[in-house]
Amino acid sequence: MEAGKKILIITGDAGESFEILYASHRLREEDYIPVIAAPSVKRMNLVMHDFEPGWDTYVERMGYIIQSDISFDEVDPSEYAAVLIPGGRAPEYLRNDPRVIKIIKEFHKNNKYIFAICHGVQILVTAGVVDKKNVACYEHVKFEVEACGGHYVTPDEAVKDGKIVTGKTWQSHPEFYKMVFSCLRESTENITKAAGAFS
């Protein structure tokens, strides 16, 4: 397998359908290998968050069903070029899973790219990696970001700060994925150069 091509996607039941499927499809389209990790290997029930007239907050509907590839126990961060965390309601409970926090801290410690969008930023907050970072996220995660030392970015739809790239919602996909693929291309080039230096 070509170095730097595997991208870890962290999600679970109630992950946002569009964000997960879009990530998986776009990564494949660019010849990366998305690997979906969840609490266990299973068929997951995804959801769709949308806005309805007369509602003060979003509504949640059943979305697609998708199979996870591996469990969190099987994740070896050294095998991946980056980790991507979609939103939905999944991050709300996954942030309480010590395996997830350990994975994110490992990526951060090894200076690998961490991508998160919408509620996915809740996991970054819990992992303690947003301090003094510019962060884009769903507006109602703003308090958590700021309470943990991060700077909520507005009006930008997505922002890169060091090795962390964040986006506000699935409506931010165009801006978010431009940054994601720019980072991945840079990472792949660096890996290729390093491999050439030792060949």
Image (cartoon, helix red, strand yellow):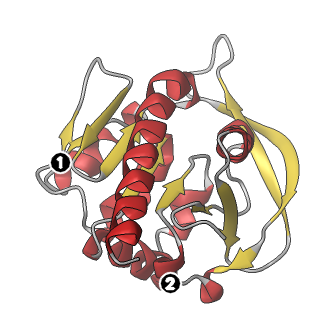
How many neighbours does mark 2 have within 10 angstroms: few (below 14), some (14-19), or many (20 or more)? some
Q: Residue at x 49, y 76 (%)?
A: 100
Residue farthest to the front?
199
- Which element is circle 1 on? loop
Q: Position of residue 121 (x, y in %)?
A: 40, 51
Q: Residue at x 61, y 66 (%)?
A: 2
Give the image quarter of residue 151.
Answer: top left
Q: Position of residue 160 (x, y in %)?
A: 28, 39
Q: Which mark is residue 133?
A: 1
The quadrant of the image that shows the C terminus is bottom left
In the image, residue 138 sits, relative to residue 38, either above or below, namely: above
Q: Position of residue 116 (x, y in %)?
A: 45, 48
- Which element is circle 2 on? helix
Q: Residue at x 54, y 67 (%)?
A: 3
In the image, residue 194 sits, relative to residue 74, either above or below, namely: above
The quadrant of the image that shows the N terminus is bottom right
Residue farthest to the bottom?
73
Left/right of residue 82 with respect to residue 147 in the rendered view: right
Q: Which mark is residue 82?
A: none
| Amino acid type of the residue that numbered disc 1 sits on in the rendered structure | Lys
Give the image quarter of residue 138.
Answer: top left
Whichever of labels 2 and 1 marks the residue nearer the N terminus, that label is: 2
| Amino acid type of the residue that numbered disc 2 sits on in the rendered structure | Arg
Left/right of residue 168 with respect to residue 30 in the rendered view: left
Which one is in front, 191 or 182? Answer: 191
Q: Residue at x 54, y 58 (%)?
A: 91
Q: Which mark is residue 99?
A: 2
In the image, residue 56 sits, relative to residue 97, either above or below, namely: above
